[in-house]
Amino acid sequence: MEPATWTDRITAWRAAPDGARARARWERIPDNVAQSMAFEREPAMTPRAGRAAGPAAAPDLGAR
């Protein structure tokens, strides 16, 4: 079930484990890039088509 209000979303985000938040940020990168390129009216491959081979592995953010 998805949170109903923006405050519920923020509370759920803050309660999520660090790994889940890092994974969500990593998975949003193609969408963010495509939106940015569309704003500039540049041609861009849609993120959906790029995911046909599967998502790229997220970097290990825990090893510092």
Image (cartoon, rainbow, N blue to C red):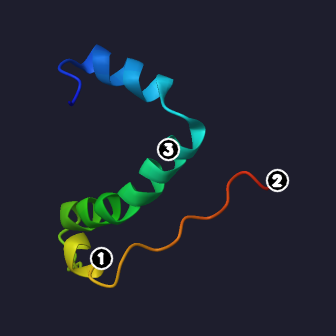
Determine the CA span between mark 1 and mark 2: 28 Å
Q: Position of residue 53 (x, y in %)?
A: 33, 85
Going by the numbered disc 3, the residue's amino acid type is Ala
- The tag earlier along the polypeptide, 3 or 1, is 3
15 sits to left or right of 60: left
Which quadrant is home to the N terminus?
top left
Nearer the observer: mark 3 or 1; the answer is 3
Determine the CA span between mark 3 and mark 2: 18 Å
The quadrant where residue 63 appears: bottom right
Residue at 30% over, 14% down: 7
46 sits to left or right of 62: left
Q: Please state which of residues 26 and 39 is positioned toward the viewer in this rendering.
A: 26
Going by the numbered disc 1, the residue's amino acid type is Arg
The quadrant where residue 39 appears: bottom left
Q: Tell me if mark 3 has few (under 14), some (14-19) or many (20+) residues whose alpha carbon lies within 10 angstroms of its own.
A: few
Q: Residue 23, which numbered label?
A: none
The quadrant where residue 55 appears: bottom left
* Residue that sits furthest to the bottom in the current view: 53
Name the residue tied to disc 1.
51
Name the residue tied to disc 2.
64
- The tag earlier along the polypeptide, 3 or 2, is 3
Q: Tell me if mark 1 has few (under 14), some (14-19) or many (20+) residues whose alpha carbon lies within 10 angstroms of its own.
A: few
Against 33, is 46 above or below?
below
Q: Tell me if mark 2 has few (under 14), some (14-19) or many (20+) residues whose alpha carbon lies within 10 angstroms of its own.
A: few
Nearer the observer: mark 3 or 2; the answer is 3
* Residue that sits furthest to the top in the current view: 7
Going by the numbered disc 2, the residue's amino acid type is Arg
Against 6, is 50 above or below?
below
